[in-house]
Amino acid sequence: AKLAAHCTPCLGPAIPVDWCLCTSSLAAALRSSLRSPAARELGSQMPAPAQTACVSPSSEVSGCWRLHTTVPSGFRRLPAASDLTSGFCMSAAVAAGALHVGRRHVGDRRRCRGFRHRANSAIALKAAEQGGAEPDRGFRILEWASSALGGQKLLVKTARWGSKEAWRTMVKELAPQSPDGDYMRAKSQLISPASKIPAEFSIGGHAVYVGNTCPWCHRVQLALTLRRVPQNLVASVRLLDEPERASRGGWAFDPSRGVSDPVFDAADLREVYDLAAGQPGGSGYVGRCTAPLLVDRQARRAVSNDNPQIVRFVGMARGAAAVEGKEVDLFPTHLREEIDQTNAWTYELVSNAVYRAGFSTSQAGFDRAVKDAARGLERVEKLLEKQRFVCGDRLTEADVMLLPCACRFDAVYAFLFLRGACGLWRERPALKRWLFDCWSLPGVRDTLDVQACQESYYRTLFPLNPSQIVPARPEGSLAEIGPKEVLNEEEAAKLLHWRDVPAATA
């Protein structure tokens, strides 16, 4: 009734196209969305464009018609009406808001009074050209604020403050913060005394829990691969990065996807921690459930969740696969002091600096982290301009500790954490050459799925990426732009340090 009253002044020998289309779509909406017999009867009595002389077969009208036919689906998304009057008014509001496309009429150009909302005709026709879909404007709160509050200033300020506080709170849950908004990485809680770290591998002796996304897990995987440690000595137990499945933390198993726990048959990493590191008497583990986690399979107890300690164990223990009486040495005696020093500054200025930038909750904290990351990248670039690897012309543990960051830098860290402030890894010639040299070693490219890693970061860390949209990787993945050929064993051997294997072990 209200719709008819508003449009009555326009009705005449030439009925406006807007009215014809509105009434037709309104009739369809009433017939399809309201169950009231009276509503269906009223809808069936409304005029249709085919019965109205004012409808022409012009492309403009056809375009409008395609647009208007989408109204019933839009109406059905509204709450169901309990009576004919409210249903009619709701339908009228939808029709008026979506279909009244300006002042253009066929036959006369009089303005249809009463409709406060008028969609822009250009937008409407553009939507029609794109298949009839209308733009989703959300709840149109800003438009309401402009009218009801006399401006949007208060609403915008409130929304900005609220969203920032909500974001800051979520980030603190993920990454502990200093009072100045700097990310403070928690220290590893399970670190064994050096005397308890075995000097030799044993059959069925250990298992290490690792996930594809985590760079600290990747360090361990690289050490196992480069040293050729078989699964029967140190079993790599795969974890899925699925916080929805995990009872605490983000790591879980899914037997239906072939990912299970061969040691404890646990459902997630928290259960592994409860069983392997829980307090005597049956109480569970209290602390952060992080990966990697090294477990003694015979004693069924956790050994360490400190990735530098695990990498050092894998790199120094005797019993890895030997080649002509020698085994790979990632921590050669004459370079140990240099390796330790290099590990310290590459961690602070590169590997951890990118995380400090990503999880900073203040502008000052972010700026400090970006400055450190830029300084670290420049330092490594100058170092690699003079030598092939980080600590000389052969690969060492220092390269193993830095490589996971390099593999993830362009796909994740450069944009998600650093917001483009430090550019790309591949834009620095020496860093790019070093990365390709490492990537060409046998087995290295099998230690990481770059695409799955990128998707996990962008979708799991939703406080940093609320849209969960995954960007295209620049110039393709590392596998696509990296060296196509893997070095053969003889060529790779020249890039590694080797040590003699004791006769009994050999």
Image (cartoon, grey):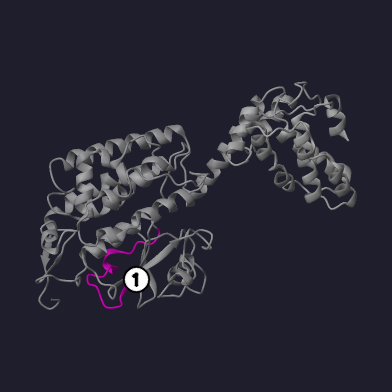
Against 15, residue 207 (above or below) is below
Q: Which residue bears the numbered disc 1?
A: 207
Against 346, residue 102 (above or below) is above
Residues rendered magenta in the picture: 189-207
Q: Which amino acid lies under the numbered mark 1 shown in the image of this protein?
A: Ala
Question: Residue 356: where, in percent of width, then height?
Answer: 39, 42
Q: Residue at x 11, y 73 (%)?
A: 502
Crowding at dot 1, Cα within 10 Å, few <14 / some 14-19 / many 20+, comes out as many
> Which residue is more in the foreground, 487 or 28?
28
Left or right relative to 64: residue 266: left
Q: Where's the N terminus, which quadrant?
A: top right
Q: Is residue 262 visible?
A: yes
Against 212, residue 63 (above or below) is above
Question: Residue 278: where, in percent of width, then height?
Answer: 47, 69
Disc 1 is placed on an element classified as strand
> Which residue is more in the foreground, 455 or 14?
14
- Quarter of the image holding residue 147? top right
Question: Residue 448: where, in percent of width, then height?
Answer: 32, 58
Magenta span: chief secondary structure: loop
Number of numbered discs visible in the structure rendering: 1
Q: Is residue 43 magenta?
A: no
Q: Residue at x 42, y 35 (%)?
A: 365
